[in-house]
Image (cartoon, rainbow, N blue to C red):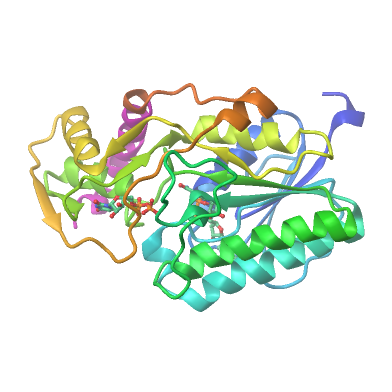
Amino acid sequence: MKAADRKRILVTGGAGFLGSHLCEALLRQGHELLCADNFLTGSRRNLLSLLRHPRFRLMRHDVTQPLEVDVDEIYNLACPASPVHYQQDPVRTTRTSVLGTLNLLELARRSGARLLQASTSEVYGDPLQHPQTESYWGNVNPVGVRACYDEGKRCAETLCMDYRRQYGVDAKLVRIFNTYGPRMQADDGRVVSNFVMQALRGAPLTVYGDGMQTRSFCYVEDMVRGLVAMMGTPAGTGGPVNLGNPNECTMLELAQQVIHLCDSVSSVEHRPLPSDDPARRRPDIGLARQLLGWAPEVPLEAGLQRTIGWFRQQWRAAPALAAE
Ligand code: NAD
Ligand code: UDP
């Protein structure tokens, strides 16, 4: 990369699952990276291969505090994403999305940096439209246990759009649908990590409710390509744009597939459905195809195989993972 094309990029939440893969991809492209994280759900371990890289810097920082750095682009990924994690301290979750996005938009306004906000399919709540297009306003319970995440992210979207309209900030919104892959935390409660760990241990897979609820799972590599493509769009393009894999499956189907791919003896055990759990979710990615020329390439089976391989490796390195 020519020095003139090299950008200084801030990734908040860069020590997390998605953020660490994004940092790797941006470094590979030749950019200079500053990763800011408070290590709530992320860790240095996710960045081990990058810590000594001459173009990479890691700082402990909570995005609810203002930040003064000189960068060209900001990816705001800071926020716990697993329902178990974001419901542990719901007030903190809302503060992270709202104050965090506000602080980073202020930084973008002062410095002229471009900002990409990691929003979520959760802004559609328990959707009444299927599949979900960006024009759908959603069906969110504002007083439920998931609201700290959903409404925090919705407010962050509002802030991005208003900073665009009011101050001309080049803020871009992507709505990320369920994403999985290596470096998910084994105990974060999300369905893919839960099922894989349970199958590897030979324990029953905990299917919540009747297991007929659906999700559409996108492999992390595909998602990172989408995030970078969106950041590269001209200033007039702000989204929101859905990013996800439209291949939808029920949680029961997912459980069977994980058992099969792990060659496991596990059975399936039903547990109560958490409140406000969305019944169906599948992105319409027509806009992403048209604007970004983007579509996921990794099929669920191949992505699950890579993820299972990674969890097996973790297990070998730290056998304590095998215990429940
Ligand atoms: P993750 O929990 O692995 O990563 C989040 C990172 O943000 C962690 O490193 C955490 O320590 C950091 N963080 C949390 N609060 C912070 C704060 N106040 N200040 C600084 N850092 C903070 O989750 P992930 O799956 O990598 O998700 C990354 C982003 O993508 C999140 O914003 C999430 O809402 C969004 N997203 C993810 C998915 C998905 O399926 N993975 C789906 C939709 C949206
Ligand atoms: N789920 C499940 N068993 C688990 C964990 C989750 O059946 O051990 C279900 C959960 O109820 C939801 C789906 O899997 O319907 C996806 O859950 P996850 O927490 O991964 O993501 P989200 O609900 O935020 O899409």
Q: Position of residue 19 (x, y in %)?
A: 58, 47
Q: Is residue 213 left or right of residue 68?
A: left
Q: Residue at x 50, y 55 (%)?
A: 138
Q: Residue at x 62, y 32 (%)?
A: 287
Front-most of 149 and 129?
A: 129
The rendered magenta stretch, by its main secondary structure, is classed as: helix
Let me know if residue 66 appears in the view: yes
Q: Residue at x 78, y 60 (%)?
A: 162
The boundaries of the magenta stretch are 303-324
Q: Residue at x 68, y 71 (%)?
A: 99
* Residue 241, quarter of picture: top right
Q: Position of residue 309 (x, y in %)?
A: 32, 31
Q: Position of residue 214 (x, y in %)?
A: 31, 43
Is residue 321 rendered magenta in the image? yes
Front-most of 322 and 71?
A: 71
Is residue 61 positioned above or below 239 on the image?
Answer: below
